[in-house]
Amino acid sequence: MSLPWRRLIRFIATDGRTLRGEPILPTPTTDLGFITESDKLQARVIKGDDLYDTTGKTRVTDEIVSVKTVLGPLAQADVPILRCVGLNYAKHVKEAGRTPPPFPFIFFKPNTTIHDHGAPVTIPHIAQDSQADYEGELCLVIGRDAKNISPENALSYVAAYTVGNDISARKLQREPALAGRVPQWGFSKGFDTFAPLGPCLVAASEIADPSKLLLKTIVDGEVRQEEYVADLLFDCAYLVSYLSQGTTLQKGSVIMTGTPGGEFYLFWFCVIGMELVELTRVFRCWRWSFAA
């Protein structure tokens, strides 16, 4: 898809408006995950109702504003649903002692899990017993409705890439006393704020081959997950094609492609960062909090 923007952020400007824009990066390696008002980042305002418009109705304007607070690139209303893939990194499957699945293992997260960059993640009372866990993932954003498409054409339906955290309550997911004999992935991963994304979208035109991306998850300065997307059992094109069989992938849908090995439970407040490194760089960091 040929979009009018290369990178997209959603932000609060210093004049108080909530806008979308193309960030004006001081350097090619500027890390948007650490941007604060003191950095005086500027952005060109994006005008148009459709983020993924290719007709010229949505455009990057000449209006330049200063960024006060970077939000998540997508609001809940922008995302009809999140489709998620489990056990999709070969090394993760081996690490877990599992047999590679013959087809993608699919589960869903509601759009109420979408959460802003830099905002506290709320762990509900039911999951406040040392079971909250992170999963850093490459995320695909569908730019036009897709149904019954082939793997060869699948990536033409991807508008952008970003990173996300498939936050999970592990005991509710896995422990037989709480989840039953068969692990369940919906309730345990579907709490409000359990899918932080961003802080920016990178247009698919900027990433020629997503398999060359390196995904990292960093917790309090320690690298916990690090793997190339090439380790996916089912690659990005296959996932988009597979998920579209008999089902309409609506514009704006997010596909979370799975997590590498190395997750660990988190306690109280941790700062978590996620990176995708190729020719472009996306970074994500936030803090965890507990519900009152």
Image (cartoon, grey):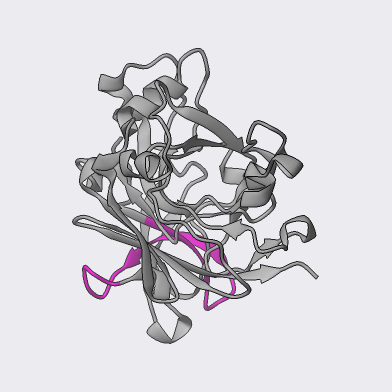
- Residue positioned most to the bottom: 38
Q: Quadrant of residue 92?
A: top left
- Residue 208 horizontal/vertical position (percent): 19, 41
- Residue 93 horizontal/vertical position (percent): 39, 39
Q: Nearer the viewer, residue 273 or 67?
A: 273
Segment tinted magenta in the rendering: 8-30
Can residue 55 be seen here? The reply is: no
Q: Is residue 171 left or right of residue 6?
A: right
Q: Residue shown at 30%/21% (left/top)?
A: 151
- Residue 146 horizontal/vertical position (percent): 44, 22
Q: Residue shown at 50%/26% (left/top)?
A: 249
In the displayed structure, 182 sits above or below 277; it is above
Q: Residue shown at 32%/43% (left/top)?
A: 91
In the displayed structure, 191 sits above or below 15; it is above
Q: Is residue 30 left or right of residue 180?
A: left
- Residue 69 horizontal/vertical position (percent): 52, 73
Q: Nearer the viewer, residue 27 or 5?
A: 27
Tally of numbered tags: 0
Q: Is residue 255 magenta?
A: no
**Quadrant where the C terminus is found in the figure:** bottom right
Q: Nearer the viewer, residue 246 or 75?
A: 246
**Quadrant where the N terminus is found in the figure:** top left
Q: Quadrant of residue 230?
A: top left
Q: Residue shown at 42%/14% (left/top)?
A: 148
Q: Nearer the viewer, residue 97 or 118?
A: 97
Q: Is residue 10 magenta?
A: yes
Can residue 203 be seen here? The reply is: yes
In the displayed structure, 12 sits above or below 253; it is below
